[in-house]
Image (spheres, rainbow, N blue to C red):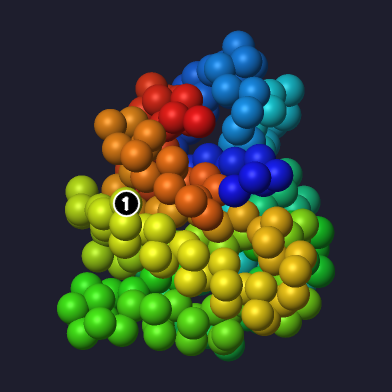
């Protein structure tokens, strides 16, 4: 989208131990070499690695992020991690409402909205994920599902500065399947229009990422689609060569 600097974001999910930090160093080094000055980069890592990841990436253009946060700032929530804790560990962004959170942890739109507001409260940018299941696509409900998720998951006070929307068709995540460029164009145009309806003209500058089986081999096609302002990359963000190979698509 004209005027929007693309963002290539990684999501390590429940992957990575100390040994994986070498890949992170290689990603940081790649961007240090000016590999892609056009593109902003972010790697969201498990909370166990966040502080070390942020330290490794501190002198690079790549930012570190969290993968989820609790809506509250602190309290009796054993095992949970607040947005303030992520910020303290060095995060700049946090993924909210990933389909795996929605499925594995029963997160609904209201929970996702509360988590986005928690992210802002802590000074983090919220990366809010939406996307239809295969059954919803087969039933022709894709655009309705996206509208409903935007209405429910994106707070009314979201701005281009504090929120990024990631379109991730659930059936394309980790499957090697991707929508056609035309399908991506239709979904992203719809998301843009709905965001502008809901949030006003400022949403014309909000980043809308595509996520779901993005790889170096399909990045040029997928990221070249209108209203695609970057990628959210799962599997291919675990290897520096793949992630850097996607970043150069711009
Ligand atoms: C994701 O989990 O956000 C994702 C897009 O995964 P993958 O790239 O592995 O499909």
Instruction: Write the residue at 73% across / 60% down.
Output: 160
x, y percentage for residue 35? 56, 17
Mark 1 element type: helix
Q: What is the total number of numbered labels drawn onto the structure image? A: 1
Horizontal relation, residue 110 to residue 22: left or right: right
Answer with the quarter of the image where residue 36 lies.
top right
Say if residue 152 shows up in the picture: yes
Horizontal side of 215 relative to 194 (left or right) equals left
Write the residue at 60% across / 32% down: 39
Q: Quadrant of residue 184?
A: bottom left
Residue 131 location (% of width, % of height): 39, 70
Q: Is the CB of the residue bearing disc 1 within 8 angstroms of ligand 1? A: no
Residue at (26, 54) in percent of width and height = 180
Q: Quadrant of residue 192?
A: bottom right
Position of residue 25 in the picture relative to residue 196 (left or right): left
Could you say where residue 60 lies in the image, as x and y percent from the top left? 68, 24
| Along the viewing direction, whichever of 159 and 113 lies nearer the viewer | 159
The residue carrying mark 1 is 181
Q: Say which residue appears at 53% left-offset and 84% top-offset.
A: 109
Above or below 71: residue 225: above
Where residue 246 appears, as percent x and y from the top left, is 42, 32
Q: Can residue 91 be seen? A: no
Q: Residues within 10 Å of mark 1 (few under 14, many from 20)?
A: some
Task: Work out whether residue 190 or residue 119 is closer to the camera in this orientation and state it.
Answer: 190
Residue 114 position (above or below residue 69): below
Q: Nearer the viewer, residue 157 or 25?
A: 157
Residue 159 vs 223, above or below: the answer is below
């Amino acid at each position: 989208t004209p005027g929007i600097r693309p963002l290539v974001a990684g999501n390590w999910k429940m992957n990575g131990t100390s040994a994986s930090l070498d890949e992170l160093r290689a990603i940081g080094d790649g961007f240090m070499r000016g590999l892609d000055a056009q593109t902003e980069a972010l790697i969201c890592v498990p909370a166990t690695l966040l502080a070390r990841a942020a330290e490794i990436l501190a002198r690079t253009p790549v930012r570190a992020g969290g993968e989820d946060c609790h809506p509250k700032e602190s309290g009796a929530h054993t095992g949970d991690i607040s947005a303030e804790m992520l910020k303290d560990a060095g995060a700049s962004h946090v993924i909210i409402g990933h389909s795996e959170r929605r499925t594995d942890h029963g997160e609904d739109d209201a929970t996702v909205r509360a988590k986005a507001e928690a992210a802002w409260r802590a000074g983090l940018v919220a990366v809010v994920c939406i996307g239809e299941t295969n059954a919803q696509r087969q039933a022709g409900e894709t655009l309705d599902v996206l509208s409903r998720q935007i209405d429910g998951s994106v707070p009314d006070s979201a701005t281009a500065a504090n929120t990024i929307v990631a379109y991730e068709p659930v059936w394309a995540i980790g499957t090697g399947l991707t929508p056609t460029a035309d399908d991506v164009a239709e979904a992203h145009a719809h998301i843009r229009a709905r965001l502008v309806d809901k949030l006003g003209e400022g949403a014309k500058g909000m980043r809308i990422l595509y996520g779901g089986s993005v790889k170096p081999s399909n990045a040029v096609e997928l990221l070249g689609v209108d209203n695609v302002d970057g990628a959210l990359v799962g599997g291919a963000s675990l290897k520096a060569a793949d992630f850097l190979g996607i970043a150069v698509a711009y």
